[in-house]
Image (tube, helix red, strand yellow):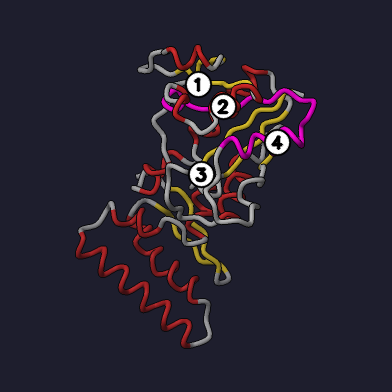
Amino acid sequence: MKIGIFGGSFDPIHLGHTRIINEAIIALQLDKMLIVPTKHNPWKEDSVANNQQRIEMIQIALKDNSKCEVCTLEIDRQDNEKNYTIDTIKELKKIYKNDQLYFMMGMDQASQFDKWKSAKEISELVQLVAFNRKGYQKNDVLNDYHFEFIQADSTAESSTQFKAGNKEIVDRNVYTYAFQNGLYLENFVSGYMSEKRFKHTCSVAKLAREFAVANGIDGKKAYIFQKSASLFLLGFDILFDNNELYIHYKKF
């Protein structure tokens, strides 16, 4: 089989990710695409969503693509050491001994691949693939490590943009899941409020949580419900049904 490997923090997975995944499956004629959420990304020190939440958001975003599979190899590791690509590749080669593996990355990462840990060994174990985007020039590093190239649509999406309030860049079901689970609320709301109002909103939400807990009610749900009042002002329809919160996208 021809198997693609696409890793990242996916905190959360966004439309840029899903577009790249679909383009790679077609261009490389892949039989399977492994989506590998990282446990400890060497370039990012923390995450907002926990491991299970990131897995569930990936599954929601890719539910209609039968060739995609979430690989939990990295986040299932019990140690607290940072994980590097070479570690994951070696484990996957044990599982897929007779298959061709394609490891994918953006041109920004590919152009600096020589700085990766065990770069030469990685290039010998898998076929490296870079998404060729406008603005990046091919250099000697790409030739030295025998990269293949896929022409991908230029994309500026990033998980950071979503956390800052850009709700357009994620699947609607993903951000509904995120907000129902209290993810990214502070990041999302703060970009639309003055510092004073944001602090007041957080204070009221925390008070609602404490009051709920004191009265035997789910404190997390109370916190989210209170924050939902702010989300309404940011362009969301808020619906309460049988004590559950449903958040729907609404255009201004």
Q: Is residue 150 visible?
A: no
In front: label 3 or label 4: 4
The numbered mark, 4 or 1, whose residue comes first in the sequence reads: 4
Q: How far apart are the two marked residues, 2 and 3, measured between alpha carbons?
A: 14 Å
Quarter of the image with the N terminus in it:
top right
Q: Which residue is mark 1?
A: 131
In front: label 4 or label 1: 4
Q: How far apart are the two marked residues, 3 and 4, measured between alpha carbons?
A: 18 Å
Q: How far apart are the two marked residues, 4 and 1, measured between alpha carbons?
A: 22 Å
Q: Residue 92 bears which disc, if any?
A: 4
Q: Residues within 10 Å of mark 4 (few under 14, many from 20)?
A: some
Q: How far apart are the two marked residues, 3 and 1, measured between alpha carbons?
A: 18 Å
User: Which residue type carries mark 3?
Assistant: Ser
What's the magenta region?
85-109
Q: Residues within 10 Å of mark 2 (few under 14, many from 20)?
A: many
In which quarter of the view is residue 190 placed?
bottom left
User: Which residue type carries mark 4?
Assistant: Leu
The numbered mark, 1 or 2, whose residue comes first in the sequence reads: 2
Residue 66 in the image, given as x and y percentages of width and height? 72, 34
Q: Which residue is mark 3?
A: 9
Q: Residues within 10 Å of mark 3 (few under 14, many from 20)?
A: some
Is 99 situated above or below 158?
above
The numbered mark, 2 or 3, whose residue comes first in the sequence reads: 3
In the image: residue 80, left or right of residue 138: right
